[in-house]
């Protein structure tokens, strides 16, 4: 799964079978791998009280030069001095902590384009 972020539009979700290692082509845009590899940290799928996935929260392990710009994207919320990023897929931001503690990992890359960012994640089983 890819989640594309920008300052102009709400996050967009894309189902992808395989995530490339260096370049990503999507919607006519060419995005480059950030160089951080395929491990960015653990992530939780944020679920509301009906178990619907409304977003994803990633606990970033490494310093990321893109943190400030990512935090300016629509529905992206940075916390803990740039170490925690929550991305909400829509306007709903009310999630249940007890249902949002997956601690998933792997398949996680950051791609950077001229005005967008794309994160890859392994899709949750209950999406």
Image: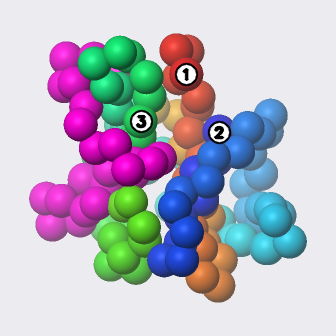
Q: Which residues are magenta?
A: 77-104
Numbered-mark total:
3
Q: Residue at x 80, y 34 (%)?
A: 17
Quarter-wise, where is residue 48 in the image? top left
Please tell me whether mark 3 sits on a helix, a strand or a loop: strand
Which mark's residue is nearer the viewer, 1 or 2? 1
Q: Residue furthest left?
A: 80
Q: Position of residue 76 (x, y in %)?
A: 36, 61
**Magenta: main secondary structure:** loop
Q: Position of residue 24 (x, y in %)?
A: 77, 62
Distance from label 1 to label 3 (Cα)?
A: 9 Å
Please name the residue that numbered disc 1 is placed on: 127
Left or right of 23, for residue 64 = left
Q: Position of residue 23 (x, y in %)?
A: 77, 65
Please name the residue that numbered disc 2 is placed on: 1
Q: Quadrant of the C terminus?
A: top right
Please tell me whether mark 2 sits on a helix, a strand or a loop: loop
Which mark's residue is nearer the viewer, 3 or 2? 3
Q: Position of residue 107 (x, y in %)?
A: 59, 38
Please name the residue that numbered disc 3 is placed on: 54
Left or right of 64, for residue 113 = right
Check contact, mark 1 vs mark 2: CB within 8 A.
yes
Sequence-first disc among 1 and 3: 3
Q: Nearer the viewer, residue 64 or 126?
A: 126
């Amino acid at each position: 799964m890819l989640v594309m972020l920008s300052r102009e539009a709400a996050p967009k979700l894309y189902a992808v079978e395989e995530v490339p290692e260096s370049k990503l082509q999507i919607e006519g845009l060419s995005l480059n791998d950030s160089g951080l590899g395929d491990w960015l940290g653990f992530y939780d799928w944020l679920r509301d009280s009906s178990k619907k996935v409304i977003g994803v929260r990633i606990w970033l392990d490494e310093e990321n030069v893109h943190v400030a710009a990512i935090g300016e994207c629509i529905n992206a919320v940075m916390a803990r001095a740039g170490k925690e990023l929550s991305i909400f897929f829509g306007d709903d931001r009310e999630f249940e902590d007890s249902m949002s503690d997956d601690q998933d990992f792997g398949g996680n890359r950051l791609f950077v384009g001229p005005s967008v960012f794309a994160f890859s994640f392994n899709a949750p089983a209950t999406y």
